[in-house]
Image (cartoon, rainbow, N blue to C red):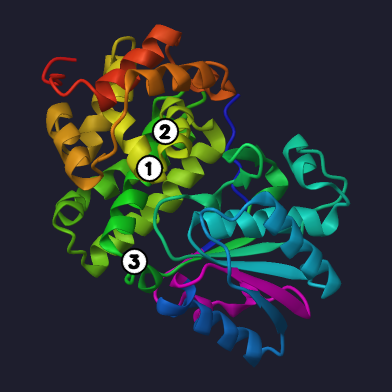
């Protein structure tokens, strides 16, 4: 029976932190976790600190999280939080920062070794986490999923627990205005993948369909801005709401073929996450259309482009400029075929299917999308 569970309190609009401060106050002392730049440049860190100071909340600041921060470092952040008797956590930044905060919250309250976090068995409730996104793509601010970089081999691995939904998320468009164009494009494409992978999913329901189609529509409204690299405040709001909506959708359906295949490309070729996923997106839609043409058509209609035009847009917004060989593809197929997320695809998927999708996405430049 379909269900919809999303316990995160969503607060949005300009100055929402200052207008709704009570959802950021959960004890006497907190740890703020950020990346190196965006929390400061966006003004989000100053806004959070002002509210904490006004309410006499002590805080520790860790500002070193990046997309390559590994699980050992995150574990060490948690030990620091324990030593300082931290009551709750605030993550300010992109997906890597928010995921780090969620992982730290588990480590602080549970006496486990770093890799045991992936067992998804926690005796104690994690600390509350408040998320303040400064990018518009990952959806980590509205999901129970956490993606971490593991030490050996250098790869990414995820875990999931309903205890890891953030307590609250503040969506303030102002915090995304300083995003570089490339980051804006990559994260928007990632958010689009979340929404489409949720809609073309065996776990999809009327509830998840509603938010996933709206996310696709909102990103489509800002397609011209993604192409030009010139974003109005309305575009920024569309992309931010779409990112969180996409997160809400995959929180209930799980991810799908695009992400499981794209992760292999990102880790192997160091291609940004959104670009790697985006390159596979149109092939995924065409693949699902073989067995469910109507849902595939609804995706394209919601975005506002026909499939060949959609492909051209993705290629321009998130181009791939790294050489990919058939040997690379063979390696990725062997890794992808064992991924549990294959079960979410509405089509039966074979190794040959995976190889064809990879080949058409990265090597076959003559692929014609006028006919599915």
Indicate whether residue 37 is drawn in magenta. yes
- Cα gap from disc 2 to disc 1, whole angstroms: 7 Å
The quarter of the rendered structure image containing the C terminus is top left
Q: Nearer the viewer, mark 3 or mark 2?
A: 2
- Cα gap from disc 1 to disc 3, whole angstroms: 19 Å
Res. 14 image quadrant:
bottom left
The quarter of the rendered structure image containing the N terminus is top right
| Mark 3 / mark 2, whichever is N-terminal | 3
| Mark 1 / mark 3, whichever is N-terminal | 3
Residue 106 appears at what percent x and percent y?
A: 76, 53
- The answer to whether the residues at label 3 and label 2 have Cβ atoms under 8 Å apart is no
Residue under label 2, please give it: 265
Residue under label 3, please give it: 179
Helix, strand or loop for disc 1:
loop
Helix, strand or loop for disc 3:
loop
- Cα gap from disc 3 to disc 2, whole angstroms: 24 Å
Residue 295 in view: no
- The answer to whether the residues at label 2 and label 1 have Cβ atoms under 8 Å apart is yes
| Mark 2 / mark 1, whichever is N-terminal | 2
- Left or right: 186 as drawn, with respect to 225: right
Residue 318 appears at what percent x and percent y?
A: 26, 44
Helix, strand or loop for disc 2:
helix
Question: Is residue 25 depicted above or below 133 in this figure?
Answer: below
**What span is colored magenta in the figure?**
11-38
Q: Dot 2: few (<14), some (14–19), or many (≥20) neighbours within 10 Å?
A: many
Residue 274 appears at what percent x and percent y?
A: 37, 44
Residue under label 1, please give it: 271
């Amino acid at each position: 029976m379909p269900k919809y569970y999303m316990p995160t309190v969503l607060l949005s609009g300009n100055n929402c932190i200052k207008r709704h401060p009570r959802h950021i106050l959960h004890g006497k002392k907190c740890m703020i976790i950020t990346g190196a730049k965006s929390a400061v440049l966006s003004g989000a860190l100053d806004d959070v600190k002002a509210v904490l100071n006004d309410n006499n909340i002590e805080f520790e600041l860790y500002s070193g999280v990046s997309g390559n921060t590994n699980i050992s470092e995150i574990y060490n952040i948690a030990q620091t939080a324990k030593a300082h008797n931290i009551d709750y956590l605030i993550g300010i930044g992109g997906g890597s920062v928010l995921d780090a905060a969620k992982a730290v919250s588990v480590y602080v309250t549970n006496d486990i070794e770093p890799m045991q976090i992936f067992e998804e068995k926690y005796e104690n409730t994690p600390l509350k986490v408040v998320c303040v996104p400064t990018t518009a793509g990952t959806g980590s601010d509205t999901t129970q999923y956490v993606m971490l970089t593991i030490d050996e081999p250098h790869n990414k691995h995820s875990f999931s627990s309903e205890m890891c939904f953030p307590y609250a998320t503040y969506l303030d468009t102002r915090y995304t205005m300083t995003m570089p164009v490339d980051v804006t494009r990559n994260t928007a494409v990632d958010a689009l993948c979340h929404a489409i992978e949720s809609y073309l999913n065996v776990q999809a329901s009327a509830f998840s369909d509603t938010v996933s189609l709206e996310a696709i529509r909102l990103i489509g409204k800002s397609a011209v801005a993604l192409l030009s690299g010139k974003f109005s405040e309305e575009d920024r709001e569309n992309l931010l709401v779409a990112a969180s909506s996409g997160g809400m959708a995959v929180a209930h359906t799980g991810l799908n073929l695009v992400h499981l295949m794209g992760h292999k490309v990102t880790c192997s070729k160091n291609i940004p996450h959104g670009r790697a996923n985006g390159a596979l997106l149109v092939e995924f839609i065409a693949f699902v259309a073989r067995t469910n043409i109507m849902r595939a058509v609804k995706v394209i209609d919601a975005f506002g482009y026909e499939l060949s035009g959609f492909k051209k847009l993705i290629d321009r917004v998130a181009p791939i400029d790294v050489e990919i060989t058939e040997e690379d593809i063979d390696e990725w197929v062997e890794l992808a075929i064992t991924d549990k997320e294959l079960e979410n695809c509405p089509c039966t998927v074979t190794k040959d299917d995976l190889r064809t999708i990879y080949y058409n996405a990265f090597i076959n430049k003559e692929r014609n999308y006028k006919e599915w």
